[in-house]
Image: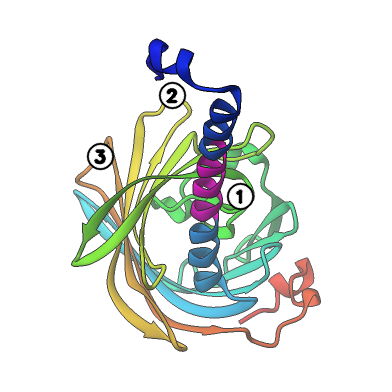
């Protein structure tokens, strides 16, 4: 805040100059934060990709592992196919533009998921339907601000706050994420509800090279209210910029894909 005496002695031109510089600095910082998130997101997604992963759901009384394959094209098309265990094999989830579909082969049932189900856990995990299909865009649906810096696992990181835009249809009220300054690797994220209570923490662990890109090979999700629970996603394989067409993502192919 300006000192009143100093402000009185300043010329109008000096005041205008300071206000312009202050506004430019804030605008530049916001743009830098958005660019960091975009580079992080582009590195993880590519123009298209296919991958194989395992998801281990850890609960006090049991542990369950699910294996699945993923295919994605841009931000509008995504499909996942469960390969194990046998009782879940063949289950498919698909994002087609703004729609999400689910297919259960055992009862030959195809359903369209309503927006209210996007925050629910996929396959009984702490991983939501929104996470699965990336329904919301962390680049376009949020306003980004660098709020600090921190060292995580020996890597210097930006701490970036993401607040949803007023017109965005998103699950979270706020996200804090920590991004490696040099490699644009997401090493930690905290997800908050609309009342800014922490819902879960997500950790990126054991960075490895996948198709020439350094990424965490393990993602651990810890719910805030049940810290004894865990969902651990292990990436076995990712190939980026693969040849895949829009017509791959169809309800017909959900029944055929393997």
Residue 13, placed above or below residue 191 = above
- Dot 3 falls on a residue whose secondary structure is loop
At a point 55% along the width and 61% down the height, the residue shown is 38
At a point 34% along the width and 35% down the height, the residue shown is 198
Q: Is residue 35 left or right of residue 257?
A: left
Residue 109, percent from left and from top: 69, 57
Q: Is residue 166 left or right of residue 177?
A: right
> For the residues carrying marks 1 and 3, which lies nearer the camera in this image?
1
Residue 130, percent from left and from top: 55, 50
Q: Main secondary structure of the magenta part?
A: helix
Is label 1 in contact with label 3 (beta carbons under 8 Å)? Answer: no
Residue 59 magenta-drawn? Answer: no
Callout 3: few (<14), some (14-19), or many (20+) C-alpha neighbours within 10 Å? few
Most foreground residue, 6 or 48: 6
Q: What is the distance, in whole Å, between disc 1 and disc 3 at their CAs?
A: 25 Å
Residue at which label 2 appears = 195
At a point 38% along the width and 51% down the height, the residue shown is 177
Q: Which residues are magenta?
A: 23-34
Residue at which label 1 appears = 136
Callout 1: few (<14), some (14-19), or many (20+) C-alpha neighbours within 10 Å? many
Q: What is the distance, in whole Å, between disc 3 and disc 2 at their CAs?
A: 18 Å
Residue 61, percent from left and from top: 20, 50
Q: What is the distance, in whole Å, between disc 1 and disc 2 at their CAs?
A: 19 Å
Check the image and tell me how it is coloured: rainbow
């Amino acid at each position: 805040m300006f000192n009143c005496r100093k402000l009185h002695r300043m010329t109008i031109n000096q005041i205008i100059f300071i206000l312009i510089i202050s506004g430019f600095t804030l605008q530049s910082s916001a743009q830098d934060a958005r660019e960091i998130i975009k580079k992080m997101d582009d590195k993880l997604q590519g123009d298209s990709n296919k991958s194989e992963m395992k998801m281990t759901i850890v609960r006090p009384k049991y542990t369950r592992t699910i294996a699945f394959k993923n295919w994605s094209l841009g931000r509008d098309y995504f499909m996942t196919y469960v390969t194990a265990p046998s009782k879940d094999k063949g289950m498919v989830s698909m994002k087609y533009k703004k729609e999400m579909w689910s297919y259960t082969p055992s009862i030959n049932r195809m359903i369209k998921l309503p927006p209210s189900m996007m925050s629910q856990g996929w396959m009984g995990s702490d991983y939501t339907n929104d996470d699965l299909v990336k329904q919301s865009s962390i680049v376009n649906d949020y306003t980004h601000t660098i709020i600090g810096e921190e060292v995580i696992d020996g890597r210097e990181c930006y701490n970036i706050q993401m607040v949803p835009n007023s017109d965005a249809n998103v699950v979270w009220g706020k996200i804090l994420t920590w991004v490696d300054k040099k490699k644009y690797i997401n090493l930690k994220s905290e997800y908050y509800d609309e009342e800014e209570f922490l819902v879960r923490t997500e950790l990126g662990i054991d960075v490895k090279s996948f198709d020439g890109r350094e990424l965490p090979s393990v993602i651990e999700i810890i719910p805030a209210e049940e810290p004894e629970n865990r969902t651990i996603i292990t990436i076995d394989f990712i190939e980026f910029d693969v040849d895949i067409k829009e017509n791959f993502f169809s309800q017909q192919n959900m029944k055929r894909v393997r």
